[in-house]
Image: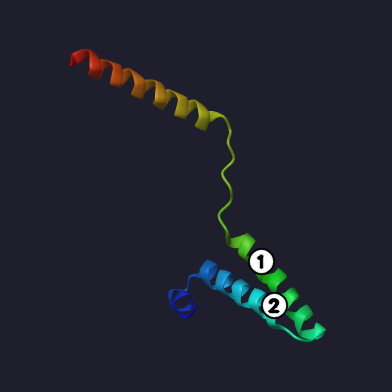
Amino acid sequence: MRRAVERRDREAVLAATAAVLADGLDGASSLTSKSMAAKALVDVLRELEAVAPAEKENDGLDDLAARRAARRARGAAAQDSARS
């Protein structure tokens, strides 16, 4: 975690913190310490979710571009085999 802090890699620091808190939940003996660790873990996971890159929505153009690329690749392969 120290390297992530030194690099100022917020996402890595949050992920490492979440792992430490989760381990702390497993090892906690009192209900108070477990509840505090659980609350902190939930807070860190929310923050981690906020800094994570958004999932790319598929708007149909990606599928169209992929089909076009595949069609062109098949056409190029057919031309190459015809030349051979």
Mark 2 residue crowding within 10 angstroms, few (<14) / some (14–19) / many (20+): few
Name the residue located 63 percent from the left edge and 61 percent from the top edge.
Answer: 50
Q: Is residue 75 above or below residue 31?
A: above
Earlier-in-chain disc, 2 versus 1? 2
- Mark 2 residue element: helix
Horizontal side, residue 48 vs residue 72: left or right: right
Q: Residue furthest right?
A: 31
Q: In the image, residue 59 lies at what x, y percent?
A: 58, 33
Residue 79 vs residue 6, the one in the foreground: 79
Q: In the image, residue 62 lies at what x, y percent?
A: 51, 32
What's the amino acid at mark 2? Answer: Asp
Q: Which residue is mark 1?
A: 45
- Mark 1 residue element: helix
Callout 2–callout 1 Cβ contact below 8 Å:
no
- Return the mark for residue 26: 2
Q: In the image, residue 41 lies at what x, y percent?
A: 69, 72
Image quadrant holding the C terminus, namely: top left
- Return the mark for residue 8: none
Horizontal side, residue 34 vs residue 11: left or right: right
Q: Nearer the viewer, mark 2 or mark 1?
A: 2
Residue 41 vs residue 82, the one in the foreground: 82
Q: In the image, residue 38 lies at what x, y percent?
A: 74, 74
Q: Is residue 73 above or below residue 28?
A: above
Q: Residue furthest top?
A: 82
Give how far apart the Cα atoms at labels 2 and 1 are.
Answer: 17 Å
Mark 1 residue crowding within 10 angstroms, few (<14) / some (14–19) / many (20+): some
**Protein image colouring:** rainbow
Horizontal side, residue 48 vs residue 26: left or right: left
Name the residue located 68 percent from the left edge and 65 percent from the top edge.
Answer: 46
